[in-house]
């Protein structure tokens, strides 16, 4: 807990939303380990925030499945739920398939130019910082949603993406950026051709790749996942980095 990076919170704004965003980012990036207890009193002192606000943030995270509440009410970082990842991918695929179809029907020139510029940036970043591809990939999908007039629904998609993002941040090796960029290029090519069904197929294939690497990630990081074969006692706890 003492190694937790310090955060700066605005004392003039409500603490709970700030703490929530801070802890949510840590958990999503796997900067804290699944199963790690979140000792509320110590954590509140470490972050210099009111404990009731911290509790409010933790309860919100528990509602999203990122934090587990033990029978005595004490919280710990939740493991990645495999069925949750698969379900989130299924729902996201259904929504984004319709989004890309709507975009391909119009094939707006300015949008295509913007998307191709994003892909160039992805290629430039790819070799230097593979993990930054997560953020560039998110920007790519958000741009498509906004172009289809579905910008407001992106907030709902972000909720679906939580478990998927934990997997994507887990390790850069199985999720190589190069195939990701090639898939983005294929989607844009189909949009430019006004190939509605081709764009849909390219998007579906793109989103299914994450589930394809799940078995390898579970084998490599078994303590991070909640699977039916797990020992109910759980794995040994590992301190925060």
Image (cartoon, rainbow, N blue to C red):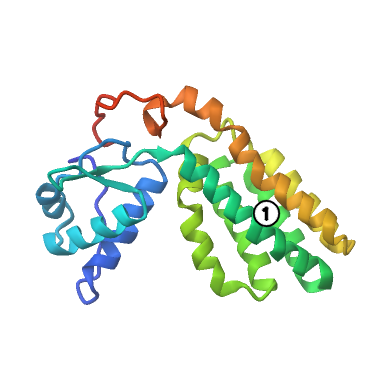
Residue depicted at x 55% and y 70%: 153
77 vs 50, left or right, is right
**Residue on which disc 1 sits:** 121
Rendered location of residue 188, percent (x, y): 79, 57
240 vs 202, left or right, is left
Residue depicted at x 50% and y 34%: 171
- Residue 129 seen: no
State how many labels appear: 1
140 vs 189, left or right, is left
Rendered location of residue 174, percent (x, y): 59, 31
Say above or below: 126 vs 11: above
208 vs 234, left or right, is right
Residue depicted at x 21% and y 62%: 56
Rendered location of residue 91, percent (x, y): 58, 55
Say above or below: 147 vs 43: below
SS at circle 1: helix
Say above or below: 115 vs 203: below
Q: Which image quadrant: the C terminus?
A: top left
Residue occupying the far front of the picture: 228
- Residue 216 seen: yes
Residue depicted at x 50% and y 65%: 156
Please rate how many residues cluster around mark 1, counting C-alpha atoms within 10 Å: few if below 14, some from 14 to 19, many from 20.
few
Rendered location of residue 164, percent (x, y): 51, 46
Q: Which image quadrant: the N terminus?
A: top left
């Amino acid at each position: 807990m003492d190694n937790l990076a310090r955060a700066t919170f605005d004392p003039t704004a409500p603490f709970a939303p700030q703490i929530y965003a801070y802890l949510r980012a840590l958990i999503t990036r796997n900067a804290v380990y699944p199963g790690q207890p979140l000792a509320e009193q110590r954590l509140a002192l470490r972050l210099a925030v009111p404990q009731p606000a911290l509790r409010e943030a933790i309860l919100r995270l528990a509602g999203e499945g990122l934090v587990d509440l033990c029978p005595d009410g004490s919280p710990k970082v939740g493991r990645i739920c495999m069925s949750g990842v698969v379900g989130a991918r299924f729902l996201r695929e259904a929504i984004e398939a319709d989004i890309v179809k709507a975009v391909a029907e119009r094939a707006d020139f300015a949008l295509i130019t913007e998307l191709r510029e994003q892909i160039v940036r992805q290629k430039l970043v790819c070799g230097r910082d593979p993990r930054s591809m997560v953020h560039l990939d998110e920007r790519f999908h958000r741009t498509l949603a906004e172009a289809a007039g579905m910008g407001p629904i992106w907030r709902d998609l972000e909720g679906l993406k939580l478990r998927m993002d934990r997997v994507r941040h887990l390790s850069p090796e199985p999720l190589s950026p190069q195939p990701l960029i090639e898939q983005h290029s294929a989607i844009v090519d189909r949009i430019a051709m006004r190939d509605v069904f081709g764009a849909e197929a390219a998007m579906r294939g793109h989103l299914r790749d994450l589930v394809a690497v799940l078995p390898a990630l579970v084998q490599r990081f078994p303590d991070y996942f909640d699977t039916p074969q797990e020992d109910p006692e759980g794995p040994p706890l590992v301190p925060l980095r």
